[in-house]
Image (tube, helix red, strand yellow):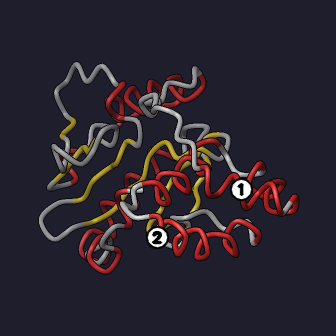
Amino acid sequence: MEPNSDKKHVWHSNHLWEEELLLLKFIIDKTELEETIKWGGPVYVYNKKNVIGIGGFKDYFTIWFYNGVFLKDEKKKLINAQEDKTKSLRQWRFTSKDDVNEKEILEYIAEAIENEKQGKIIKPSKKEAIISELLQKEMNQNPALAEAFQKFSPYKQYEFLEYIETAKQEKTKLTRIEKVIPMILGNVGLNDKYR
């Protein structure tokens, strides 16, 4: 999620580090990860899950570890680019080819893949269930709506309910319900357009 929050700037310096990024690619190609392109930069996936990404910035080029928080990081290479925002993403920054130690990088990637295989991810904290009586009423009258709602993941159901129920006044709740009904029927999550 994080790397694309300001798409325009994130990968703009790839051309500055062309050779260096090719070197990283050459190293990563020795692993079992598959290369894809997301957010305009190479992202390497295992079982369709993002494991690492690479990119160039103005002052450095980097490997992102999507679940880097779980890496032991014995060599103290990883940084959290945005302390308060980023829970799991970690970056390993390089400023020249000399910084690139293939053996170390492969060790970190192997650990990241192993973590992915074990399904180590930060679980969203358990949230209190929200009940929306007004939406429930709509669903009772409209079985197609109820059925469509059930197709969403619990997380997305929660987003809809939270959106409706955070409104103070019933009037606002009703306008919000009107807004989300077509989305629910169209199988569009509340925040899909931002994802």
**Residue that sits furthest to the front in the current view:** 170
Q: Residues within 10 Å of mark 2 (few under 14, many from 20)?
A: few
* Residue 65, x across and y down, in percent: 37, 42
Depth order, front residue of 159/63:
159
Q: Position of residue 177 (x, y in %)?
A: 59, 68
- Label 2, secondary structure: give it: loop
Q: Which residue in the protein does label 1 denote?
A: 137
The image quarter in which residue 22 lies: bottom left
Number of dots carrying numbers: 2
Residue under the point 20% across and 49% down: 93
**Can you tell which quarter of the image residue 6 is in?**
bottom left
Which residue in the structure is indicated by mark 2? 194
Quarter of the figure with residue 185: bottom right
Q: Residue at x 34, y 67 (%)?
A: 5
Asked if the residue at tag 2 contacts the one at tag 1, i.e. Cβ–Cβ closer than 8 Å, the answer is no
Above or below residue 124? Residue 82 is below
Residue sitting at x 30%, y 39%: 87
